[in-house]
Image (cartoon, helix red, strand yellow):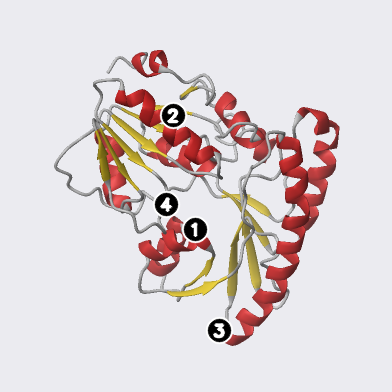
Amino acid sequence: MIPIVYDLLEKGYEVILGGDGDALKLISQEFPTLKQIKIPDIKVSFKYRWMTLNLLLLIPKIIFSAVREHKLIKKIQKVNSINVIISDNRYGLWNKDVKSIFVSHQIMIKLPKPFKSFEYFTHFIIKKAILQFNECWIPDYENPNKSISGDLSHKYTPPSNSKYIGPLSRYTNVEASTIDKSYDIVALLSGPEPQRTQLERKLIKLIQSTKYRAMVIQGKPSSNNKSILINNIEVTPHLPAGVIKSLIQQSKFVLCRSGYTSIMDITLLNSKALIIPTPKQTEQEYLAKHLNSSFHSISQKKINLETLKAFDL
């Protein structure tokens, strides 16, 4: 959404930010003068070892959230006289009285093996939901041979209201900041708990036993904690986009999840990267495999010292 907001402001639109939690905190830090409205979102947490159970429990939450936000957006639109609604992968944020746009690279969902036979049916339901909007913007290339998202936006016919708008990155509109030191490794953490914390602890333990200088960015824009130094590793909750851009460009390589936003960012910056999918998260596991020719990828369970040394720092 950050590059989309920049584009709207450049064209003279008045923009209101809506969201919840770290997502709203992050975008409001980028645009501190814009009005904000809280729109509650579901809290995703993969607390059970059986990922299929986690996904099944998530379905009713998604349905309830879509119904709730659809009712809420009607009230928000009336009070604020909104002309256009742009929804970041939230199915309930549309209103038949105003132009409504859905933004997502995930037009189909990669299901776990036990549910593979339901994949097209799931796509059909998602397609019907997206058709409630006037337009669907897919942040990827239309040419399947150049596609970053692969099957997620190209395996099945997209909704008739779709158009490919090319990859988006928050760093497109951001000047790199001047920094006084560089690092061998920059780790960008993100995603649901407890896996985010588990990866953080594992990486810190591994890097501590090396000579490499590392910066670990926890992906916690709402945190008030200060940066700390653990031997050769600096750990910080969050940094401004310009600083992160410089750190990525000046580091020898980046460690990050294989989430689509992270992949678009490191693609734009042409970074050497090791991508680590969130365990059992089928979208990230697929993207890691799909992009293995562009980036190195490894499972969270298998990452070790030899993995890091393979980059010949």
Residue, disc 4: 220
Along the horizontal axis of the image, is 132 left or right of 221?
right
Element at label 1: helix
The mark found on residue 202 in the picture is 2
Q: Is residue 50 left or right of residue 283?
A: right
Q: Nearer the viewer, mark 3 or mark 4?
A: 4
Q: Earlier in the sequence, mark 2 or mark 4?
A: 2
Q: CA distance from mark 1 to mark 4?
A: 10 Å
Q: Residues within 10 Å of mark 4 (few under 14, many from 20)?
A: some
Q: Of the residues under marks 1 and 4, which one precedes in the sequence? A: 1
Q: How far is disc 3 from disc 1 in space, using C-alphas? A: 21 Å
The quarter holding residue 195 reads top right
Which label's residue is closer to the chain start, 3 or 4?
3
Question: Is label 2 or label 1 in front?
Answer: 2
The residue positioned 73% from the left and 57% from the top of the image is 61
Residue 93 picture location, percent across and down: 66, 67
Q: Mark 2 and mark 3 in contact? Answer it, CB < 8 Å.
A: no
Q: Quadrant of the C terminus?
A: top left
Query: Which residue carries the number 3 mark?
Result: 80
Q: Give 52 or 35, whichever is nearer the viewer.
A: 52
Name the front one of labels 3 and 1: 1
* Alpha carbon distance from label 3 to label 4: 30 Å
Secondary structure category for the residue under label 4 = loop
Q: Residues within 10 Å of mark 2 (few under 14, many from 20)?
A: some
Q: Is residue 10 above or below residue 274?
A: below
* Numbered disc total: 4
- Mark 2 in CB contact with mark 1 (< 8 angstroms): no
